[in-house]
């Protein structure tokens, strides 16, 4: 093996001159060091990479379902759930419903204790004494109220999944002449009744001061949903993608140009 060259200066010799110091930074071309770590400077700044992301499966299913609902022809019974009431109308409806939220467990126990105490004292108190007017929820309960025509107005969520759970409810409300509104969304209805979500809720009775407002909402429901024949007949979907639309437009223009040529040749 060859001996290593010594870097030390020889005896009596002088050390080699040090390299010239690095030149000063050029103001015209400033140094911009990059970070090549994950998420560093290699990615072009400002570029939207959302279409390259591998999204979770439930997100992909949601988006595919939305696209399919646009592409396929959707029957009127399902398409009516896309026609929910507007933002301003919905906020007024939810303000009214918020006054009649069901009791919490602790509030109900307290009321029952007071009712029992008054019964012991001899005050007249029936089984449902002092029960406040409140929203009714639960699909079976709401269905029973509609069948018995006890519901004053029914609110149905527009995004129930599977949709078959409430698909028949608008038809039942129309048959029993019970006003109904389709609203956004099941989570918002759920907050009214202390649940995560609710497919449908119903109001049976309200206080005297709110009867006029309830009548306005009943008339709105009758006009927009119960007696709206177009809602029952109009199909949805059938909207093609941008590429397909461009292709069809191009084909239509080509046919129109060909027809124009034929017409011009016949005139000659």
Image (cartoon, grey):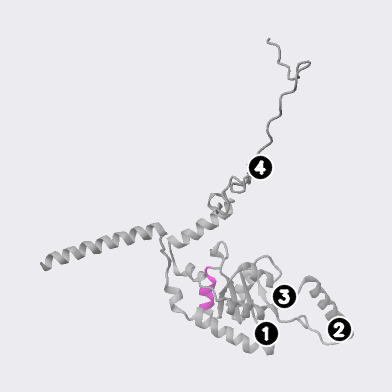
- In three-dimensional space, the C-alpha distance between marks 3 and 4, rounded to whole angstroms, equals 76 Å
Q: Mark 4: which secondary structure? A: loop
Q: Circle 1 sits on which residue?
A: 206
Quarter residue 106 falls in: bottom right
Q: Is residue 144 left or right of residue 194?
A: left
Q: Mark 1: which secondary structure? A: loop
Residue mark closest to the camera, 4 vs 1: 4
Q: Residues within 10 Å of mark 3 (few under 14, many from 20)?
A: some
Q: Earlier in the sequence, mark 4 or mark 1?
A: 4
Q: Earlier in the sequence, mark 1 or mark 2?
A: 2
Q: Tell me where residue 3 appears, x and y as whole percent.
A: 71, 11
Residue 170 colored in magenta in the image: yes
Per the picture, the main secondary structure of the magenta-coloured stretch is helix
Q: Is residue 241 left or right of residue 171?
A: left
Q: Is residue 18 left or right of residue 78?
A: right
- In three-dimensional space, the C-alpha distance between marks 4 and 1, rounded to whole angstroms, equals 82 Å
Q: Circle 4 sits on which residue?
A: 24
- In three-dimensional space, the C-alpha distance between marks 3 and 2, rounded to whole angstroms, equals 23 Å
Where is 25 relative to 241, above or below?
above
Q: Mark 3: which secondary structure? A: loop
Q: Tell me where residue 185 appears, x and y as whole percent.
A: 60, 69
Q: Circle 3 sits on which residue?
A: 102
Residue at 31 percent of width and 59 percent of height: 250
Q: Earlier in the sequence, mark 3 or mark 2?
A: 3
For the record, the magenta segment spans 167-174
Q: Tell me where residue 18 appears, x and y as whole percent.
A: 71, 29
Q: Tell me where residue 258 appears, x and y as whole percent.
A: 21, 61
Residue mark closest to the camera, 3 vs 2: 3
Residue at 71 percent of width and 69 percent of height: 194
Q: Residues within 10 Å of mark 2 (few under 14, many from 20)?
A: few
């Amino acid at each position: 093996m060859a001996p290593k060259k010594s870097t030390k200066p020889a005896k009596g010799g002088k050390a080699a001159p040090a390299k010239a110091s690095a030149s000063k930074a050029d103001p015209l071309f400033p140094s911009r060091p990059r970070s090549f770590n994950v998420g560093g400077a290699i990615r072009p700044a400002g570029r939207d990479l959302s279409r390259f992301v591998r999204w979770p499966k439930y997100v992909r299913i949601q988006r595919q379902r939305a696209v399919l609902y646009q592409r396929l022809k959707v029957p009127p019974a399902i398409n009516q759930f896309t026609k929910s009431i507007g933002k301003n109308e919905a906020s007024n409806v939810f303000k009214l419903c918020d006054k009649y939220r069901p009791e919490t467990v602790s509030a109900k126990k307290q009321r029952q204790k007071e009712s029992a105490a008054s019964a012991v004292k001899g005050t007249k108190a029936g089984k449902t004494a002092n029960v406040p007017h409140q929203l009714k929820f639960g699909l079976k309960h709401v269905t029973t109220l509609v069948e018995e025509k006890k519901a004053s107005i029914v609110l149905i969520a527009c995004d129930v999944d599977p949709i078959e759970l409430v698909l028949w409810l608008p038809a039942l409300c129309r048959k029993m002449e019970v006003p109904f509104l389709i609203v956004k969304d099941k989570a918002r209805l759920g907050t009214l009744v202390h649940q995560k979500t609710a497919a449908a809720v119903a109001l049976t009775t309200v206080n005297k001061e709110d009867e006029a407002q309830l009548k306005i909402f009943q008339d709105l429901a009758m006009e927009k949903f119960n007696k709206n024949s177009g809602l029952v007949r109009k199909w949805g979907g059938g909207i093609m993608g941008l590429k397909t639309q461009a292709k069809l437009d191009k084909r239509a223009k080509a046919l129109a140009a060909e027809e124009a040529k034929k017409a011009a040749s016949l005139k000659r």
